[in-house]
Image: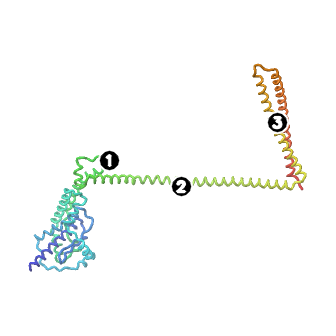
Amino acid sequence: MTDNEVWASWNRWRISLHEAGHVIAWCALSGRRDTAGVCLDGGGGLAYVGDGAGRVESGAILMAGNLAGELAERYPAPTERPTPVDCTAESDSLGAKLHDDLRQAVPDDEKVAKLCTNEAHMNLAVWTDRFHAMETLAQSILAANEAAIIEVARKLFLRGCVTQRDLEGLELKRGAEMRFLERLGARRAARLSDYEKAVLAVAAGREPVAGTLEDALHVAGKTPEDLLADAERRARRIDLGLQVAAESECVKLMAAAEGELVAFEERRAKAEAGLDAEYAEITGRLRAAREGVEAARAARQELERTATAAAREAAETAAKAVSAAHTRRCELHVELRKAGFSIAEKKRDIAWQKDGDLRAVGDRRNEIRLTEQVKALQAKSERLKSEIEAADAEIVEAEAAWSEAKAGLLKAEN
């Protein structure tokens, strides 16, 4: 083999180990086999893994590639000549994803850097902790499954691809790396619980524990501004939770109120129906009474129109007599009022005559004359009162005669 052929074989072997590290790390951490790897003839390769891994697990899967590639220093490349197979025949989706991923390929180191720094807000200590956790987990997985990596890399080297079918029979050692994840998760959860307690304290309006606040912010990769924002969101969610918890009670109250409303509507409908019936009965009686009045007036007009001339003349005479009696009574009342005014005036004159200390003989005579006039006016008032009483009796008699004459009109026949 020429030097170029030797270098190309070693490079293909290193790439195969690199992609095998990705594949084995995913299978070990997820317990699944839904993955595939490709080694290209022209150099380069790709590994397809599923979704759902956490930050540290995703970083470990990425770092496992470079760590597995270093095994090329200890394990020589296969001596057989590669005979690549059609990858798309092995997996229907492999060919389509191959072209898309090659165009959008991002170096593993760049992806790891993003996982370490994402949401850490320039916190170098957090970046370092994350990187160390990812690297330690990747080393644990590779150390426990080195033989499986070599086996998968050999298939990649010779065939150009491995699919789920090639991975089904692999026995991967999961104990060491899974125990590591559990310890890592428990340690991180214990540290993050201090930050969570601080968030809850601020959300409840209390001061967080001062001694642990700085470490909690460091482990969580948060700033004091982040703490305030998280506390505000948590307080909002607590309020929303209380509203949700009160939903059942509100539903009960709403159902009770709706039932009361239905019962009220039924009572109101019955009451309105009763009022409508009463209204109809009253209006019916009023309508009948109006019709009776109109019929009686029409009958009266017809009887008066068809009465005899003598009856009409007697009624007119009686009506005139009533009118004359009322007029006479009004005239008597006017005279009585005038007499009263005159009496009052004369009495004022008499009183004025008596006010003087030295009265002339003529004044005394005038007083006597005024007194006689008052007596005469008083006598006239008494007479007018008697005449008014007689006029009242005359009116009663005239009205009785008029009523009789009108009755005669209604009873008269042609």
Which label number is shown at residue 205? 1
The amino acid at mark 3 is Glu
Tell me the CA gap for discs 3 and 1: 100 Å
Q: Looking at the image, is 207 positioned above or below residue 17? A: above
Spatial separation of the CA atoms under disc 2 and disc 3 = 76 Å
Q: Nearer the viewer, mark 3 or mark 1?
A: 3
Residue 88 lies in quadrant: bottom left
Q: Earlier in the sequence, mark 1 or mark 2?
A: 1
Kind of element beneath mark 1: loop
Residue for badge 3: 335
Q: Position of residue 266 (x, y in %)?
A: 57, 54
Q: Is residue 117 visible?
A: yes
> Quarter of the image holding residue 34?
bottom left
Q: Amino acid at mark 1?
A: Gly
| 138 in relation to 79, above or below | above
Q: Position of residue 9 (x, y in %)?
A: 13, 76
Left/right of residue 314 with respect to residue 217 in the rendered view: right
Q: Position of residue 23 (x, y in %)?
A: 21, 69
Residue 112, percent from left and from top: 20, 64
**Which residue, given by chain and number where applicable, does mark 2 sit on?**
262
Q: Secondary structure at mark 3?
A: helix
- Give the position of the C terminus as an image quadrant: bottom right
- Label located before the other in sequence (2 or 3): 2
